Image: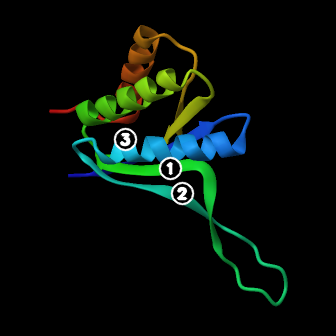
Amino acid sequence: MDTVVLRLVTLDDDDDAAEEATHRLRRELQQLDGVRSVRPAESVTVAPDGARAGELAELGTLLAALAAHAGLVVGVLRAVGDWQRRRGRGRVEVRIGDDELVLDSATADEQRRLIEVFVDRVLPPER
């Protein structure tokens, strides 16, 4: 079965708050059935002359791998939306390939509809 990778970016005015929120979201996602892995995203840094290049975790960014099954992706995104609403601030940007969904101040019903439309657009219909 194919795998889809969700790129989840938690945005907050405070870097420390974004980092802590990202750790909490990671723990929650790791407990969901069907989620294969959740890890911080890394970016390659350009090193100054004479130094070695390295990798740094991108602040507030997670990569979550799961089966490319629409029902599973919808369930995970609903969990992310619920988590964001419980926080009561900031927003979460979700990317699958080149497509992006932003979860912020929408109501639960609005988020549910946005998630369904997003998943219908980015994943092929199931047979």
Q: Residue at label 2? A: 41
Mark 2 neighbour class, 10 Å CA radius: few under 14, some 14 to 19, many 20 or more = some
Q: Residue at label 3? A: 28
How far apart are the two marked residues, 2 and 1, measured between alpha carbons?
A: 5 Å
Whether 47 is drawn above or below 35: the answer is below
Q: Is residue 90 visible?
A: yes
Query: Residue at left 50%, top 27%?
Result: 84
Where's residue 13, x and y in %? 73, 34
Query: Residue at left 42%, top 12%?
Result: 108
Where's residue 96, x and y in %? 46, 42
Q: Of all residues shown, which one is farthest toward the bottom?
A: 50
Apparent side of residue 61 relative to residue 122 in the rendered image (left or right):
right
Query: Residue at left 71%, top 85%?
Result: 52
Whether label 1 touches label 3, CB < 8 Å = no
Q: Residue at label 1? A: 62
Quadrant where the C terminus is found in the figure: top left
| Amino acid type assigned to the residue bearing label 1 in the image | Leu
Mark 1 neighbour class, 10 Å CA radius: few under 14, some 14 to 19, many 20 or more = many
Point out the tag, 1 or 3, that comes first from the N-terminus: 3
Q: Secondary structure at mark 2?
A: strand
Point out the tag, 2 or 1, that comes first from the N-terminus: 2
The image quadrant that residue 73 belongs to is top left
Apparent side of residue 27 relative to residue 51 in the rendered image (left or right):
left
Q: Secondary structure at mark 1?
A: strand
How far apart are the two marked residues, 2 and 3, measured between alpha carbons?
A: 17 Å
How far apart are the two marked residues, 1 and 3, measured between alpha carbons?
A: 12 Å
| Amino acid type assigned to the residue bearing label 3 in the image | Glu
Q: Secondary structure at mark 3?
A: helix
Whether label 2 touches label 3, CB < 8 Å = no
Where's residue 64, x and y in %? 40, 49
Apparent side of residue 41 relative to residue 72 in the rendered image (left or right):
right
| Amino acid type assigned to the residue bearing label 2 in the image | Ala
